[in-house]
Image (cartoon, rainbow, N blue to C red):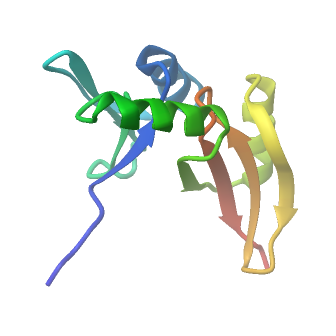
Amino acid sequence: MSMKISHTFLQVRDQEEALGFYRDVLGLDVRTDAPVEAYRWLSVGPAGQPDVEIVLEDPRMGRPADDATALRELMAKGSLGAVIFRVDDCDATFERLRAAGTEVLQEPMDQMYGVRDCAFRDPSGNQLRFSAPLKD
């Protein structure tokens, strides 16, 4: 049996703002941008992984109002989603994203589990980590 990840979801406070960040700052490709009733199905992904979609989801889509409110409150605290991207050069990625004004959570550092990584927050508060294998 073959199994692959196709979609993952990040809650975002403003889809247009998120699109600008993920497309223009991170350089991800837009996969889908389509209306779904009163909402929008918006997904992006890395060029080298055309079968992976990160859905930038409005927390109100498909949820009761109370749940959407709870998600927005958690999002404001930075307590929701996270994505880890594998990159060729952690330090260069860090410098590029810092220069673009992205909120820094962690400067590049070697981790005991075999990567050099750094961390940022997207405009909605989601944690984004960028890691590269440690060089021998």
Position of residue 132 in the picture relative to residue 82 (left or right) = right
Position of residue 2 in the picture relative to residue 81 (left or right) = left
Q: Which residue does the image show at 83% across and 49% down from the upper left?
A: 106
Q: Which residue does the image show at 33% across and 28% down from the upper left?
A: 65
Image quarter where the C terminus lies is bottom right
Quarter of the image holding residue 36?
Answer: top left
Seen in the picture, residue 102 relative to 48 is either above or below; the reply is: above
- How many marks do you count on the picture? 0
Position of residue 129 in the picture relative to residue 66 (left or right) = right
Residue 3 at what x, y percent from top left?
A: 22, 74
Q: Nearer the viewer, residue 30 or 82?
A: 82
Q: Is residue 76 visible?
A: yes
Which residue appears farthest toward the front when viewing the image? Answer: 66
Q: Nearer the viewer, residue 88 or 9?
A: 9
Quarter of the image holding residue 94?
Answer: top right
Q: Nearer the viewer, residue 70 or 100?
A: 70
Residue 60 at what x, y percent from top left?
A: 33, 27
Q: Is residue 59 visible?
A: no
Image quarter where the N terminus lies is bottom left
Q: Which residue does the image show at 73% across and 29% down from the upper left?
A: 102
Q: Which residue does the image show at 72% across and 41% down from the upper left?
A: 120
Seen in the picture, residue 28 relative to 33 is either above or below; the reply is: below
Quarter of the image holding residue 44?
Answer: top left
Residue 40 at what x, y percent from top left?
A: 25, 22
Seen in the picture, residue 135 relative to 71 is either above or below; the reply is: below
Position of residue 1 in the picture relative to residue 19 (left or right) = left
Residue 101 at what x, y percent from top left?
A: 77, 23
